[in-house]
């Protein structure tokens, strides 16, 4: 298998996890990354059992344990009164039911560990300043060109170049991902700076009319990740790193419960970005070229499954390539195995946006009954168990 070099465009979560899974299967892997340096981008991620079992299988648990947070549970809180509802247990109950832990982690921490593992295990480190701009499939693999004009060939090319994927546009002839009408605020709060009752190691989902707020601990419990998402149709910024001000942030959330206000005020630097999306679409596999991660199935973050889908993709992709004689056959099999699950996640994430932002939450007479009904235990199990039970390592191929 050593002659089969796989090329991957993009060194994000999807690209690096896929690269590690392929190395484990005995492939040689070349990773091309458009950025000139890889740094700490983004904020928190929730890695549920369907993702953590893959990371464990890649021998990453020892490196990750010091930086992840194994929160004890998740809860729903009402936007104005602060009333609480338990959502689910993330400790022993999660381990016993799903056989793997639920981790909350800073994206930069996970990315750093993936990058270090790849560079340590691969015969070539990630190549920076290497933007793949065109690609062509042929009977013997994939040919592609970088922005600097240099040309390469590989057994197969995996496009993990994200929601703004150049290769997706080239392959599917699509327009850009569409703005969803949702603006996300995000930031990190040093845990020691907030009131003691806010330091609990739990994930909290505040629900309210037209907006919601997610908070959970990261970096081994040293930081609280805070994300506020609000319906705002007129804004079109696409950067993950557009700085906002506390004044703007509090215009959106300053009228919420004081616990939310305290967290928002303690954010060191608020950032804002537009949430982009696409309707689920097939066609990721184009001969010896295939899309994975956000380039294939971008999703709203309301099931906390974007990173998990990328991690699942990595395991399934490596297994398909290890079984098939050609990249083309492996990629076609990968798409057939992954299409329906990822489409279901994308669609149900959109459903959750409506659930979190329901107008009934503005009516004090209806809000409590609404939350109690929407998040009653059996509904919660139906909403989440199918996600966490999925095992990309044992999926029938």
Image (cartoon, grey):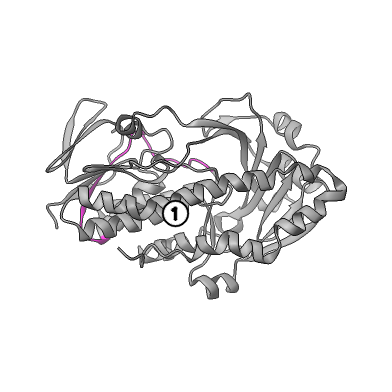
For label 1, the residue is 341
Q: Main secondary structure of the magenta part?
A: loop
In the displayed structure image, the side of residue 281 where residue 72 appears, left or right: right
Residue under the point 48% across and 38% down: 279
Range drawn in magenta = 24-42
Residue 348 vertical placement versus 70 (above, below): above
Residue under the point 28% across and 57% down: 318
Residue 165 vertical placement versus 28 (above, below): above
Tally the numbered discs.
1
Spot occupied by residue 130 in the image (x, y as percentages of width and height): 28, 33
Spot occupied by residue 338 in the image (x, y as percentages of width and height): 38, 53
Residue under the point 56% across and 70% down: 94
In the displayed structure image, the side of residue 211 where residue 29 appears, left or right: left
For numbered disc 1, what is the local secondary structure?
A: helix
Q: Quadrant of residue 322?
A: bottom left
Q: Is residue 372 visible?
A: yes
Residue under the point 55% across and 54% down: 219
Spot occupied by residue 346 in the image (x, y as percentages of width and height): 50, 46
In the displayed structure image, the side of residue 131 where residue 302 appears, left or right: right
Judge by depth and name the residue closer to the eye, 259 or 117: 259
């Amino acid at each position: 298998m050593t002659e089969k070099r796989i090329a991957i465009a993009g060194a994000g979560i999807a690209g690096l996890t896929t690269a590690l899974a392929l190395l484990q299967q005995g492939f040689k892997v070349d990773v091309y990354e458009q950025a000139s340096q890889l740094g700490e981008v983004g904020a928190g991620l929730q890695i549920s059992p369907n993702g953590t079992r893959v990371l464990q299988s890649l021998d990453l648990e020892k490196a990750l344990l010091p930086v992840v947070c194994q929160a004890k549970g998740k809860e729903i809180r009402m936007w104005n009164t602060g009333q609480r509802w338990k959502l689910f247990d993330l400790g022993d109950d999660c381990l016993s039911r799903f056989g793997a832990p639920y981790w909350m982690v800073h994206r930069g921490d996970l990315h750093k560990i993936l990058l270090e593992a790849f560079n340590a295990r691969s015969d070539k480190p990630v190549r920076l300043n290497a933007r793949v701009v065109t690609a062509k499939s042929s009977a013997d693999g994939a040919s592609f060109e970088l922005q600097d004009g240099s040309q390469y060939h590989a057994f197969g090319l995996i496009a993990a170049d994200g929601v703004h994927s150049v290769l997706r546009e080239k392959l599917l002839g699509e327009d850009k991902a569409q703005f969803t009408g949702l603006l996300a605020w995000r930031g990190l709060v040093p845990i020691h700076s907030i009131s003691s009752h806010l330091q609990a190691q739990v994930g909290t989902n505040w629900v309210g009319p037209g907006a919601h707020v997610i908070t959970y601990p990261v970096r081994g419990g040293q930081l609280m990740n805070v994300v506020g998402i609000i319906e705002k149709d007129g804004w079109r910024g696409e950067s993950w790193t557009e700085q906002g001000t506390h004044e703007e942030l509090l215009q959106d959330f300053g009228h919420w419960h004081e616990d939310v206000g305290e967290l928002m005020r303690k954010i060191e630097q608020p950032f804002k970005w537009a949430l982009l999306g696409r309707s689920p679409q097939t066609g990721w596999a184009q001969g010896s070229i295939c899309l994975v991660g956000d380039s294939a199935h971008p999703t709203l973050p309301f099931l906390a499954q974007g990173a998990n889908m990328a991690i699942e993709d990595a395991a399934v992709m490596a297994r398909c390539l290890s079984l098939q004689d050609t990249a083309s056959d492996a990629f076609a099999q990968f798409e057939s195995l992954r299409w329906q699950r990822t489409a279901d996640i994308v669609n149900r994430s959109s459903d959750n946006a409506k659930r979190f932002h329901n107008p009934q939450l503005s009516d004090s007479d209806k809000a409590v009954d609404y939350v109690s009904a929407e998040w009653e235990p059996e509904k919660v199990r139906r909403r989440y168990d199918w996600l966490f039970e999925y095992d990309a390592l044992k999926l029938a191929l």
